[in-house]
Amino acid sequence: MPITDIEKEKIKARLGKASGHLKHVYQMVDDKKYCIDVLQQLKAVQAALDKVGEIILRQHLQTCVVEAIQKQDSNSVIEELVQVFRHAPTLYQYEDETTELPSSSSNRDCCH
């Protein structure tokens, strides 16, 4: 079963926020902002993308995996998940849903 419409909207909203944050990081690099501030913002983007991965994984487990188990095809979905995690071992990490980007209160130049 594919992603539901409700989950699709959640995913798109989170991806939109992550995309906006990433554009901000790009601008910070272009403006030669302080490295630690850039790294903090980049980590927040990664956390946002990890949350999207969690939503998609949860949806997959609740639909496709359950369906496969009911059809006695659990081996194939287990192998799919093993392959995903082999290539992206940090895909599923619990993050607080209210994680916001840390604010950059520094006006320092990068590495000065």
Image (cartoon, rainbow, N blue to C red):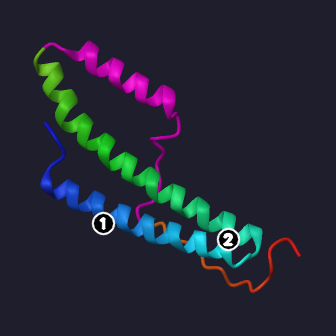
Element assignment for label 1: helix
- On screen, residue 64 above or below 5: above
Q: Which residue is mark 2?
A: 29
Q: Position of residue 68 (x, y in %)?
A: 17, 22
Q: Which residue is mark 1?
A: 13
Q: Position of residue 44 (x, y in %)?
A: 55, 63
Mark 2 belongs to which amino acid? Val
Element assignment for label 2: helix
In this rendering, would 77 be left or right of 44?
left
Name the residue located 68 percent from the left edge and 63 percent from the top edge: 39
Mark 2 neighbour density, 10 Å: few (under 14) some (14–19) many (20 or more): some
Name the residue located 40 percent from the left edge and 62 percent from the top edge: 97
The alpha-carbon separation of the residues under discs 1 and 2 comes to 25 Å
Stretch in magenta: 72-97
- On screen, residue 2 above or below 16: above
Q: Is residue 48 a member of the stretch shown in magenta?
A: no
